[in-house]
């Protein structure tokens, strides 16, 4: 009688750990960037120089004004806070890692541009001191009077919005090393002219009343709203660099374009609301003036 030996135990095959998927990349660019990557210091040196010079000039003048009681009254702390907030947002929009993702996210690019056009300029203008006296006949007064003329500011702003958002201009701003830093600068400077007209920080140079400024604000909002509507309702991607682009956060190029339209439209609403308020103030003042005249005894 033979005894059979027990069969050796069969070892189970080793269980391999599921592969860890690497984050999607496009041309070496992480398509799911973290907040740290988006906010990392990525300098645009010409814009940084302009930012530093603006901050230095402002705080130097503020320090001088604080030496007198009248200067402190004209330049309260809340104005400095607004100007500082504007500088901070200017820095975030132009000196951080968001600049590196222009080719992968039209929406992120447009968000940066709208911060420069619709958020930073009013904060900077509101941060200026009260009662700035500037002779209209001085060289600086003449230059500022020309630049802050409503029709000049409207023409410059419209040219920037229309030209740089047609395919030829916008494509160049995305792929050209020369045009890429130029567009944010143009948005910032042309919008400073627009908000300078609307908020009127230099009354001795600017003659436009509240009604004219309200009408100007509505006209200035039209180019942006028109471009935003085209992006929202277009059935195809309009800009060549984004046609086949791999976009951030798994968005398609068309979704990016439509989100950009919403960003531009929503960013323009506060300025349009302010323009309506200014027009209503003008109409109420006009009606009150006519009522006072008709109520006088003949």
Image (cartoon, helix red, strand yellow):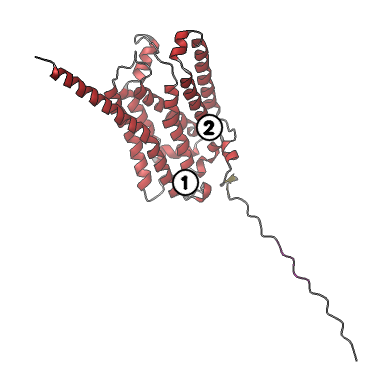
Q: Which residues are drawn in magenta?
A: 11-16
Q: Estimate the x, y position of residue 52 in percent, counting from the top left.
A: 54, 22
Q: Is residue 74 left or right of residue 246?
A: left
Q: Residue at x 47, y 24 (%)?
A: 82
Q: Is residue 179 left or right of residue 289?
A: right
**Residue 198 percent location from the top left of the image:** 34, 24
User: Which residue is labeled 1 in the image?
Assistant: 242
Looking at this view, name the residue that lies furthest to the top: 68
Locate the N terminus by quadrant: bottom right
Quick one: 70 or 126, which is closer to the camera? 70
Is disc 2 placed on a helix, strand or loop? Answer: helix
State the image coordinates of residue 12 (x, y, percent, origin top left): 75, 70
**Residue 282: assigned label:** none
Residue 165 visible, this angle: no
Secondary structure, magenta segment, majority class: loop
Q: Secondary structure at mark 1?
A: helix
Q: Residue furthest left?
A: 298
Q: Which residue is mark 2?
A: 92
Q: Is residue 221 visible?
A: yes
């Amino acid at each position: 009688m033979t005894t059979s030996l027990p069969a050796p135990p069969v070892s189970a095959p080793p269980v391999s750990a599921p592969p860890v998927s690497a984050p999607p990349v496009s041309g070496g660019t992480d398509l799911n960037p973290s907040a740290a990557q988006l906010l990392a210091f990525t300098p645009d040196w010409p814009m940084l120089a302009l930012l530093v010079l603006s901050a230095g000039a402002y705080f130097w003048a503020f320090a001088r004004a604080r030496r007198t009681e009248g200067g402190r009254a004209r330049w309260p702390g809340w104005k400095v806070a607004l100007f500082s907030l504007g500088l901070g947002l200017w820095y975030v929009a132009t000196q951080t890692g968001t600049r590196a993702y222009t080719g992968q996210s039209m929406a992120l690019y447009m968000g940066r541009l709208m911060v420069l056009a619709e958020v930073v300029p009013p904060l900077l203008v509101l941060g200026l001191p009260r009662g700035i006296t500037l002779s209209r006949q001085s060289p600086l007064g003449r230059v500022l009077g020309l630049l802050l003329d409503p029709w000049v500011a409207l023409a410059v702003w419209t040219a920037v919005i229309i030209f740089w958002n047609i395919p030829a201009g916008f494509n160049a701003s995305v792929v050209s090393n020369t045009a890429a830093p130029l567009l944010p600068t143009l948005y910032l400077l042309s919008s400073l002219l627009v908000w300078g007209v609307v908020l009127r920080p230099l009354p001795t140079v600017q003659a436009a009343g509240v009604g004219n400024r309200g009408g100007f604000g509505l006209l200035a909002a039209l180019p942006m709203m028109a471009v935003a509507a085209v992006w929202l309702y277009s059935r195809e991607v309009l800009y060549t660099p984004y046609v086949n682009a791999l976009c951030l956060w798994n968005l398609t190029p068309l979704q990016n374009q439509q989100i950009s339209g919403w960003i531009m439209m929503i960013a323009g609403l506060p300025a349009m609301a302010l323009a309506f308020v200014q027009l209503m103030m003008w109409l109420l003042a006009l009606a009150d003036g006519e009522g006072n005249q008709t109520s006088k005894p003949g």
